[in-house]
Image (cartoon, rainbow, N blue to C red):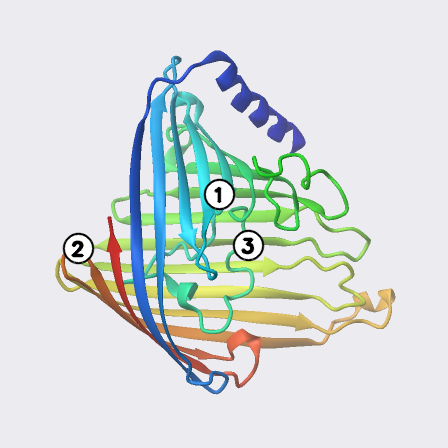
Amino acid sequence: MKNITNKLVVLFSSLFLSANAFAGELTVTGSANASYVINGGSVNNNDKGLGISNELKFAASGELDNGFTWSYFMELDGNDSGAHDNDDSQLKIGMGGLGTLYINDSEGGLSTETKMGIGAIGVGDDFANTADFVGNDTDVSGHGNIQYDAPSDALPFGLTASIAYVPNNSDGDNNSYKNAGVENTAGATGDSEMMYRLTAAPIDGLEIGADYFTTENATGTNAQVEEAGGGYIRYALGNFEVGYQERYHAPAITNKISAGGHNYKMTGVGVEFAVNDALSISYLEEESTERAYGAATNAAAKASPFTRTDTTFESEYIMVAYDIGGATIGLTNIESKNSGYTVGANTTKTLATMSMAF
């Protein structure tokens, strides 16, 4: 693993020692989204809220003397305090038949967020009521990482392969220009991460993919290493699109014998129909089952079955989107059972949105 990482770093560095960039192009795009939400259910207080979010994206691209291409983007998002953050950024080097290299910061890079991609105005638990399903977004995209994509013609059957590495992530600090080499040195709180992905489009309209994520954060005989993985399939035919996905997640546990272990299984299925060029409707079901195991009284007890309790957090979504030309009006209704993996905690949410892109 370390040898692979060292080779990627050396290859990436050599690009800048041997090539100069031609003058590139700069573009600016953005979006603005206004929303009104009504919360209800057994754990909500019928709260209502009006808000607006916005995003600006600065992108540049060019070509190196050796024929390689480069591109860079940076996104600014508004946060809850009203300020704007550098939400994510990416530097990409296209090396032709050698593949593609990326340096990603913040939310850039490989992600596991609901890859089945069904949703007239959004994707599944982007609108979750109380908390996202645990582990549904366990990936490298939240930390500074280096990523390599194999050439598109290197594998049979239209397969594409990607690998990403996070060097000793430390409590959310990115090893970027902001604090390179300061917080993210190897140490007690630094956990390196690896992620692998395969995707394929064997026939028109069909997309399938699988990924695996792991960390180097477990110590001790009975420790549980954090890992996650899953797969998805999506098929589009005419005005219809259908998707399905499964994900599994095991969080890091220092001693799963004395503390008890737990893991999560997540599934999602959705269908979307474009009534015409302006109107789309979709329906989704997502659920995540928490499997909690009781602690053992001593290490020898690990040979015996643990007491297991399953709690399933379920959500159903109905979405309608209408394009009025220059803007999209959306309406979403969500009903959830056992929100936050609490039995009997049922919630509802109705969300009206207007989105504009420029």
Distance, label 3 to label 2, CA atoms, is 35 Å
Judged from this view, the residue extending furthest toward the front is 82
Left or right: where does residue 354 sit relative to residue 231?
left
**What's the mark number on residue 326?**
2
Q: Please give the residue where the numbered disc 1 appears in the rendered image.
A: 197
323, 135: nearer the viewer: 323
Identify whether 113 is placed above or below 260. above
Nearest to the eye among marks 3 and 2: give it: 2
Q: Please give the residue where the numbered disc 3 appears in the rendered image.
A: 138
Between disc 2 and disc 1, whose residue precedes? 1
Distance, label 1 to label 3, CA atoms, is 13 Å
User: Counting other residues with Cα less than 10 Å from the Cα at mark 3, is it few (<14), some (14-19), or many (20 or more)?
Assistant: many
Query: Which amino acid type is marked by label 1?
Result: Arg
Image quarter hosting the N terminus: top right
* Dot 1: element: strand
Query: Which amino acid type is marked by label 3?
Result: Thr
**What's the mark number on residue 73?**
none
* Dot 3: element: loop
**Quadrant in which residue 127 is drawn:** bottom left
Circles 2 and 1: CB distance less than 8 Å? no
Identify whether 287 is placed above or below 1. below
304, 214: nearer the viewer: 214
Residue 116 location in percent, x, y?
A: 37, 56
User: Counting other residues with Cα less than 10 Å from the Cα at mark 1, is it few (<14), some (14-19), or many (20 or more)?
Assistant: many
Query: Which amino acid type is marked by label 2?
Result: Gly
